Amino acid sequence: MNRAGLLIYLALLCSAVAIIGWRLQDGLPLDTNIVAMLPQSEDAEWVTRAEAAERSQGSNQLIVLVGHQDFETARSAALDLGKMLEENSIVKLIQDQPQQSTLTSLNELLFPHRKGLLGEGDRRLLAAGQEQVLVDRALVQILSPLSLADAELIRRDPFLLLPNYIAASTENRSKLLSRANVLAIQESGKWFVLVRGNLVGNPFDKGFQSRARSVFDDAGGKLEKRYGDIQLLKTGAVFYGEHAYRQAEDEAGFIGMISLIGIVILNFLVFRSFQPLALSLLAIASGIAGGLAVTLLFFGSLQLLALVFGAGLIGISVDYAFHYFCERFNQASSVPAARARAIRSGLTLGLVSSVLGFITLALTPFPGLQQIALFSASGLTLAYLTVLYAFPYLDRSTPFRHGEKYLKLSMLLHDFWWRAETRKWRWLFVALLLIAGGLGAMQITVDDDVRRLQSLPTDLQAEEQAIRHLAGIENQTHRFFVRGSNPEEVLQAEEALALDLEALRASGAIGSYRMISQFVPSKARQLENQALVDDVLMPRLAEHMAAIGLSGASPYQQAENVLTVDQFTDANMPGLFSHLRVYKTPGIVVHAVSLSGVKDTARLAKLAEKSENVALISQADSLSKTFGAYRLRALIMLAVAYVVVWVFLSLRYGFVGAFKVMIPSMAAVALAPCLIALMGEPFTFFNAMSLMLIFAIGLDYALFNREATGDRQRRAMLANGLSTISTLLAFGLLALSETFAIHAFGITILVGITLAYILAPRAADLEHPMTEPL
Amino acid sequence: MGRFEQARYLRGFDKPILSEGEFFLLPRSALIWQTEKPFFSRMIIDEEGLSQAIKGAEVTRLSFKQFPGFKLLRDTLENSLSGNWAPLEEIAGTKLLPADGKYSLRFSPKTSGLTLPFAYLNFEIGDFLESVEIVKSNGDRDVITFSEQQVAPAADVRAKAESSKEKQP
């Protein structure tokens, strides 16, 4: 059996290494985009596809203001920066400032259709029979000494319909002014020139984040060398993402180092030998290899969260190793195989319970949870095989001659739960725990808002604030997607939506909005406009032409067709609109509607609910939704997992016995969120996921207590104590992190694992000890 | 403040488009251009841009952010109307030329290295600015003749501009 177990372990380990090598030929396919963890939703499939299309087009912007006292210096530096960012494939620059040639070709394209192109205000005036305002406006504009209209334009468009249409639809709402083909603003004696681009890569991708940051910093250094004292103000999701990742990495690195040192010291202190440490590393490495291989085999790529939580769960493999090495305190046996045999029952029951729990978790349609489950279950299985079948072959050591004081010390907790003289203290402790739990339960607040979960760096926020103040540009937080089966349907849906948005704008719920139909109205709208112009404005043409001294026939000839979106390429569509064309396949066309100055998201959400062809999109909201859904799902599956494990453990202990064994783990899982609520901590997705770890580890502690009899009880208690200290060092210290997710994970583990350890001895049954090994 | 008459000659049009009215200059604040014939309208050009209104309702707003060239034209008008010739001589790169007891100045943005929406400006100057001719590159031109000009404290100009609104039929 032992040899067969070893062979199976070796075969699985080699396969895992081969799979990892095969899959990682092109680097680790790590996905840090948490939105991608959402389950595929049937009715919002078009939204998912449009979002993916938008991401691939690079909807996420990078905005920089380049500042210098001298305009020309600021301008050259800005152009250089844009060039460097574009050449290094970080952004595709947005032409905020249309070139003269673009404007001319735009005019030519629109001119034949000018009768069908009316701004919203002009349309309303004509519909209300107030054409005189348009006639007077044309006269005023023609008479002005600062007139934009020349003889040629006035002759072809005496009512100046087109220039007024273009001015209304492409109104520059930022504070920037166009100068020498760039957008700039002067503030306190300094010029700031805008550089704006769409990110070419995914701002959630770790590789892209660090590349973008390093190209940007490099470019900043070069600009400073070339132009001297240049000020760069930057904002964009990629900078926030990169900062968050770096902070998490730095903190995890620092805390990880402290915990590693702690664990090494703990090992030496208790075992006084290198061997346990080296073999523990083998168990962990085997576990991670197994988890990684199976996940990569089934999913192709790895979610960052799955890696983090999965690796955390594989940390349990150290606990398996502790139980093995604590058996070396057994002076009665010096045979390594006997050590493995002594812990096999507890280890097997613990493993099967954990794996059953994870399989339950994998049955959810949430790809993130499935990955965590698969990663953990396969990783733990390999770690289990390492400890039971590889350790005895690698372990040639004799029993420890020291350790009596540790064994005695670890029994203090066991005695607290079972000695008659500590009975009233036990009741007092349980009562206090229940009171604290009850008080905490009343204070639990659920919080899935990702904006509060992020710890935003103050310097980046200050830069974003400065950009908003200087340029009046803001990072877009919300937008709509509008769907139709062809462009005409989408444009009509946009025009219907515009009626509601206009009301929201009037009430201050939003600042403004931009949609393609403001620039290219639907065919229906253009025909309506043409009819209005023909019926209401054209009867005034002869009189108007006479007033300005223009003779000849009407210059307003009927265009053969209406203007369509398809007549524009991305290059000749004004930059304000081109990025709003999101997705087009035969049968589905999706446009975005950009919103700025959003103050009331609830009213926007209501608008989206009115039509299945309109969806409100918000990165932050969909992340919050993801977290909320995962939190709830994780809790439900945790409950289901307990039921499954109960059934399994009943096979060995009976229904009541199994329930008793599960009580410590269940109590720790139930009490941990209550106790951390007493500290003022909210309950989030990250806390819920930590409960999975407490579930598995808590069960292990209890099972080892239940399975250990006689003198083995002392060694099991010592191993549990060591597991607890190492878990708290590895994860509990994360509570010190300033990154919310890591902190939430850490604080829950800290409280939950401590509880699980303290309560575990109650799982023992002194009257019915397990004498028969599994 | 004073009166103006403007003749707009558009290439290929039968006749010039004529207009006349009053102007009020509030230095470094605004130029109010009140057209009374052929119909009443008001244009206010301030630091931000120009806005045109008919019967008190705005019909056009043009921001200098969108059309920065017009900012210079506005500054030029303001300087010339207030007799502040030094900055104009500086950007024109030439001095006022005396002729028949008056002066003239031609400002051609292109030779000054500027890209502006006109080819050149001709100023005729007596005690005050008497006329300005704005010539566009396509041959269109405006001739604006000024009369009844007087200098008054800003508060008086403002009060007069306000009371002049009453002329609105």
Image: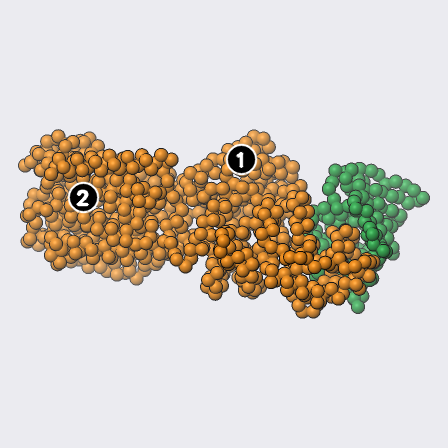
Q: What kind of colouring is applied to the model shown?
A: by chain
Q: Is residue B90 left or right of residue A308?
A: right
Q: Chain of mark 2?
A: A
Q: Is residue A763 left or right of residue A453?
A: left
Mark 1 and mark 2 residues within 8 Å of each other at the beta carbon: no
Q: Does the rendering let one see residue A186? A: no
Label the orange chain with its letter.
A
* Residue most extreme to the front: A560
Q: Quadrant of the N terminus of chain A?
A: top left
Q: Chain of mark 1?
A: A
Q: Does the rendering let one see residue A435? A: yes
Q: Which secondary structure lies at badge 2?
A: helix
Q: Quadrant of residue A328?
A: top left
Task: Residue A153: give x, y in percent of width and height.
Answer: 75, 52
Q: Label 2 sits on what residue type?
A: Gly
Q: Which mark is residue A721?
A: 2
Find disc 1 in the rendering and name its residue: A87
Task: Residue A33: give x, y in percent of width and height.
Answer: 40, 46
Above/below status of A387 relative to A453: above
* Residue most extreme to the right: B100
